[in-house]
Amino acid sequence: MKLKITLTKSPIAALPQHRATVAAIGLKKVGQYVIRPDNACVRGQIFAVKHMVKVEEIEQ
């Protein structure tokens, strides 16, 4: 299973570590999405910035 992670809120006014987490996920612009594997590392990153992203589970 994979996760589709969409950036819904701008990280400009966020904490520096939240900005770094969004960049580590691979998101740059609001509305952009990335497909990532569903594992503990990615889930931890999502949990840290859950107020700025939308997550959908997809089958591939």
Image: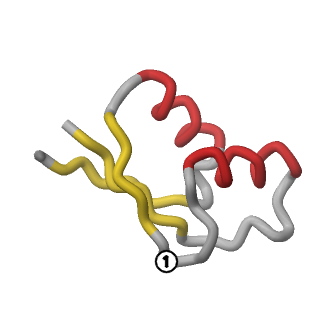
Residue where numbered disc 1 is placed = 31
Q: Position of residue 23 (x, y in %)?
A: 67, 53
Q: How is the image coloured?
A: secondary structure
* 2 with respect to 33 (left or right): left
Q: Position of residue 10 (x, y in %)?
A: 69, 72
- Outermost residue to the top: 40
Q: Can you say which quadrant of the picture contains the N terminus? A: top left
* 53 with respect to 39 (left or right): right
- Outermost residue to the left: 60
49 relative to 38, above or below = below
46 relative to 34, above or below = above
Which residue is pictured at 43% across the width and 65% down the height? 33
Q: Position of residue 54 (x, y in %)?
A: 44, 60
- Count of number-bearing discs: 1
Which residue is pictured at 74% across the width and 65% down the height? 11
Q: Position of residue 45 (x, y in %)?
A: 58, 37
Which residue is pictured at 45% across the width and 64% down the height? 6
Which residue is pictured at 64% across the width and 45% down the height? 24
Question: Looking at the image, which is closer to me, 50 or 18?
Answer: 18
Amino acid type, label 1: Gly
- Crowding at dot 1, Cα within 10 Å, few <14 / some 14-19 / many 20+, comes out as some
Secondary-structure class at tag 1: loop
